[in-house]
Image (cartoon, rainbow, N blue to C red):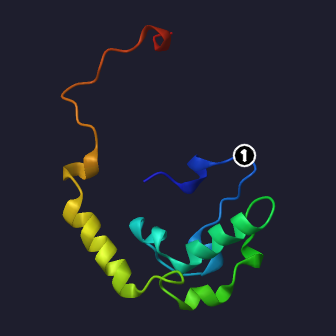
Amino acid sequence: MQPYQTADLKGGANITVQDVCPGRVVEHIEMVFDAATYGVVLDALTHPGPAEVSRVDKGLCLQKTMPGVSPGDLTAGEVDFWTHAPPKLGEHQVKAEPPLAAYAAY
């Protein structure tokens, strides 16, 4: 997995879940439902500029899921995803690498 620093966005903020809730472990798919992630996104959408950890409600660390989503919804969503995910999660599979484009050969 690539470290989050590889997805730097000019003018944005790299905030980890652990910046908000130390020790919290959230799987990739769980980020969609996670209460702390929700808090960071909500902060970014309701304030000018990037999100700031200091403005995120630390009470969200006591919740597993964002408001309006129950732990049962989280479990059902994960089950649905893994039940319907195509093999290799839909990655495009090829038998060999295509030839290198001329513009990239230099």
Q: Position of residue 35 (x, y in %)?
A: 54, 80
Q: Position of residue 43 (x, y in %)?
A: 71, 71
Residue at 70% x, 78% y is 56
Front residue of 87/74: it is 74
Residue at 63% x, 76% y is 39
Classify residue 69 by image quadrant. bottom left
Q: Is residue 67 above or below residue 29?
A: below
67 relative to 77 in the view: left or right: right
Identify residue for label 1: 10
58 relative to 83 in the view: left or right: right
Q: Residues within 10 Å of mark 1 (few under 14, many from 20)?
A: few
Classify residue 13 by image quadrant. bottom right
Secondary structure found at label 1: loop
Residue at 29% x, 19% y is 98
Report the number of discs: 1
Q: Position of residue 19 (x, y in %)?
A: 64, 74
- Give the quarter of the figure containing the N terminus: bottom left
Q: Is residue 11 above or below residue 79?
A: above
Classify residue 77 by image quadrant. bottom left
Front residue of 66/23: it is 66
Front residue of 60/72: it is 72
Q: Is residue 21 above or below residue 6?
A: below
Residue at 32% x, 14% y is 99
Which kind of residue does numbered mark 1 sit on?
Answer: Lys
Q: Is residue 100 above or below residue 28?
A: above
In the rendered image, the residue lying farthest to the right is 48
In the rendered image, the residue lying farthest to the front is 68
